[in-house]
């Protein structure tokens, strides 16, 4: 179940955001990624359990307890691996979309030249 929720894209985006700003709240992470706070909490626990991040308490500016999420060396490696998988998948999507666009352009040209002949 955890692998379906914590897929490569979510793992990569969480690790990238935390590498850039370890003090982001779970609500901030949820907003940035476009997922629920509950899913962020679940994913962060999975990252903690895998040893990819460490969480330490600190007081934020609203005098409330908050966490600082720091990537571990294993987390840095996991981020690089997730980035590679994410890039491969996005590149394949791009190539499929590019081929589909080329086909649509061809169909539009054929339809345009066909309607010119009918006039």
Image: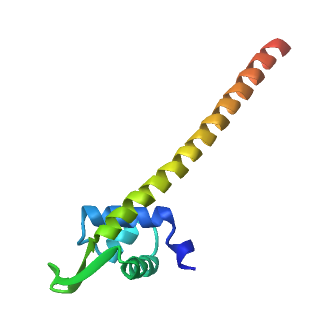
Q: Position of residue 23 (x, y in %)?
A: 23, 72
Look at the picture and state if 113 lies above or below 73: above
Q: Quadrant of residue 54?
A: bottom left
Q: Quadrant of the C terminus?
A: top right
For the question of whether residue 109 can be seen, the reply is: yes
Q: Quadrant of residue 77?
A: bottom left
Left or right of 19, for residue 50:
right
For the question of whether residue 119 can be seen, the reply is: no
Q: Position of residue 38 (x, y in %)?
A: 44, 81
Camera-nearest residue between 46 and 81: 81
For the image, the number of numbered tags is 0
Q: Quadrant of the N terminus?
A: bottom right
**Residue visible at 40% across and 71% down?**
30
Q: Quadrant of residue 43?
A: bottom left
Look at the picture and state if 89 lies above or below 16: above
Left or right of 77, for residue 101:
right
**Residue visible at 35% across and 77% down?**
51
Left or right of 60, for residue 41:
right
Q: Position of residue 90 (x, y in %)?
A: 52, 49
Q: Position of residue 65 (x, y in %)?
A: 21, 87
Camera-nearest residue between 64 and 72: 72
Look at the picture and state if 117 lies above or below 103: above
Camera-nearest residue between 54 and 25: 54
**Residue visible at 35% across and 75% down?**
27
**Residue visible at 29% across and 75% down?**
25
The furthest residue to the right: 118
Colour theme: rainbow
């Amino acid at each position: 179940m955890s692998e379906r929720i914590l897929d490569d894209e979510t793992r990569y985006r969480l690790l990238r955001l935390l590498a850039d700003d370890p003090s982001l709240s779970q609500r901030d992470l949820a907003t940035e990624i476009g997922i629920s706070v509950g899913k962020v909490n679940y994913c962060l626990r999975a990252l903690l359990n895998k040893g990819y991040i460490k969480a330490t308490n600190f007081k934020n500016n609203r005098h409330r307890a908050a966490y600082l999420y720091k990537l571990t060396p294993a987390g840095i490696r996991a981020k690089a691996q997730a980035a590679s998988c994410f890039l491969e998948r996005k590149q394949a999507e791009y190539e499929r979309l590019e081929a589909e666009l080329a086909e649509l352009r061809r169909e539009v040209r054929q339809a345009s030249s066909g309607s010119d002949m009918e006039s």
